Structures are given as structure tokens and as C-alpha cells.
Amino acid sequence: MTESLAPMWLKTSLDCPEITLEAVVDLLGVLSGSAVEQTPVKNGQSTVNGFFRLDGEDSEAEQDDVLERLEQELIELFALYELEAPKPTCSLLADEDWATSWQQFFTPFAIIPGLVIKPSWEEYVPAAGEQVIEMDPGMAFGTGQHASTKLALGLIRSCFDSRGAESVLDIGTGTGILAMGAALFGAEHVVAIDNDPEAVRVAGENIAHNVLKQKITVSGDGFDKLTGSFDLVCANIIHDVLVDMAPAIAVLVSKKGAVVLAGILAGEQEKNIIRLYETLGLTLQEARYEDEWVSLFLAR
């Protein structure tokens, strides 16, 4: 019997401008299905490391396939920001339990007051009134630690506290974190959509893992497949996509509905989004800020 080769890990490293970090971290997470490391931002840049498991049968061919797909995805992603995609550097790592060594750094945390994100290997007893979403870096890309996700969740919670929402649409759901938050806050029916099949798969796994399938439907459907309107539409994407989608989003908001928009830079992007959505019948109710990011709550 031939002894099987020990698995190896391909470490890919990218130096990225700050504006792209959340999207790059999400991309590397969903492509690798594993943890992603990010160094502190310095001079507007950060290094993002992704880790891809290689089975060891033909590691050279596997590396080529990984890098080819990653480079193509990066080109498409950075084109949204009108930037040139960085060229990833790579190195091979022996298995040696590297995949669990970072677990000590990921512990339960309150993303917003009353909502805790926890990994599966940590025990956590929620306080009275606290909700918990269980997400592992290995099963999720983007666990809610980025400012735009925190801001969006905070405004979604505020919407439920002030006006309620039975039906919610989450556009570009990614991990499904906004959809899951909405369901826990009180939504009866949540539709989560994403045009990335891998995101749909990961969101579906997270939703099932948190026993929320009865409330949340996740799919790769586009706007043309959606019917009816929603009490709340949320989208944590980027400015240019929110601009392109604005007319379609406005049509999907019910007569007394609202939108929560995130992934927007404070300043000119913020002003432009407010102007555009107000022309479509939505009025700014609240803006929340963290670092250079802003999230907007607009309503009819």
C-alpha cells in the first residue's frame, strides 16, 4: 500500500489598499475555505494572507490552478475600484497543525450590543437578551469584524427597534451575517441573494448551522427573479454597485419600507448615495460612522 502524502498549505500574500480590504478578505476566505490573516493597516496598506490546502497528489498542478483562479478573481474585484490587481506571492507550508494555531486569536465578541459572534470551539453562555451567531473562520469568509458590517448590523437592529420589519432582502449576502442578524432581530421572512455561487453555498451552510433555514432563503437569483416588496432592504457592497443597483433596490422597498446601505466611504461617496436614493423616494434617517466608513439608513 502506498503511503499517502501529507497535505501541504499554499500561503498567498497580497499587499492591498485599505479600501479593498474587506472585499479581499472575503474573496480569499471563500476561495480557500480557510482562515485569512490581515496585518494592521499602515500607510493605507495591509497585507492579507490566504491559506489553501493542497492534497499532495500533484501539488504543483494544484498551485497553478489556485493561483490562476485567484489572479483572475482579483483582476475582476480590483476593476470595481478602478485599481490594478496586486500580484500574489506564495510559499508552501507543512501541515503541522498550522490550521488550529490561530484559533486562540478568534474568541467570542459582541459585534454590536446584544449580538455575539462565536466560533464553534468556544463555549459561550449568552446574557439575558443576547443573541449568538456561530461562525468559524474556516466555514465563513468575513465574520463581522469589519467596520461596514458592524455599522450595517447596528442600523438593521435600530430599524427593528424603531419600526420593525417582517420581510427583509439582503443583497450580496456573503456569509449571510446580515440576513442572520435580521432573522434573530425579529424578521419573519428573509431573502438572501448573491451572484457568487461560493457565497451562496457558504451562506447556506452558516444559515443551516445556526438553525435559521425556516426564516431565511438563500439563492443566486438576480433582481429579475424577485417578486413583491420588502419592509427592509440591506446591502453591504461598494459605492459603485450601490449606484448601479439603486433603481432596482428602490422598486423592492415597500410603501413604508427602508434600506440600510453599507460599504460606503464617508464624504463624497456618502453624499452621492444620499442624493441618488433621495431622488428615488427614500429619505435619510440616520448615518453611522467608523473609521472612514459610513452606513446609511433611509426610509420612505
Image (cartoon, grey):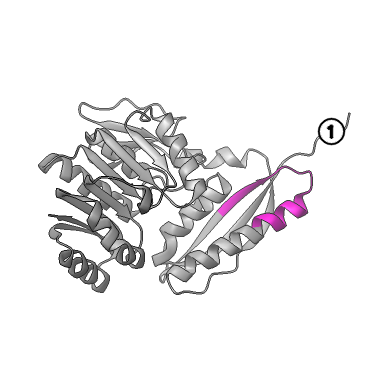
- Confirm whether the magenta stretch covers residue 63: yes
- Between 163 and 13, the residue placed more toward the observer is 163
Q: Quadrant of residue 134?
A: top left
Q: Position of residue 167 (x, y in %)?
A: 23, 39
Q: Position of residue 101 (x, y in %)?
A: 56, 40
Left or right: where does residue 3 sit relative to residue 121?
right
At horizontal 35% and vertical 53% (from top left) the residue drawn is 223
- Confirm whether the magenta stretch covers residue 250: no
Q: Residues within 10 Å of mark 1 (few under 14, many from 20)?
A: few
User: Which amino acid is tagged 1?
Assistant: Glu
At horizontal 14% and vertical 61% (from top left) the residue drawn is 281
Q: Quadrant of the C terminus?
A: bottom left
- Residue 140 at least partly seen: no
At horizontal 44% and vertical 47% (from top left) the residue drawn is 220
- Residue 247 at least partly seen: yes
Image: 122 above or below 5: above
Q: Quadrant of residue 45?
A: bottom left
- Between 147 and 253, the residue placed more toward the observer is 253
> Which residue, given by chain and number where applicable, does mark 1 sit on?
3
Range of the magenta residues? 50-66
Q: Secondary structure at mark 1?
A: loop
Q: Quadrant of the N terminus?
A: top right
Instruction: Name the residue furthest right.
Output: 1
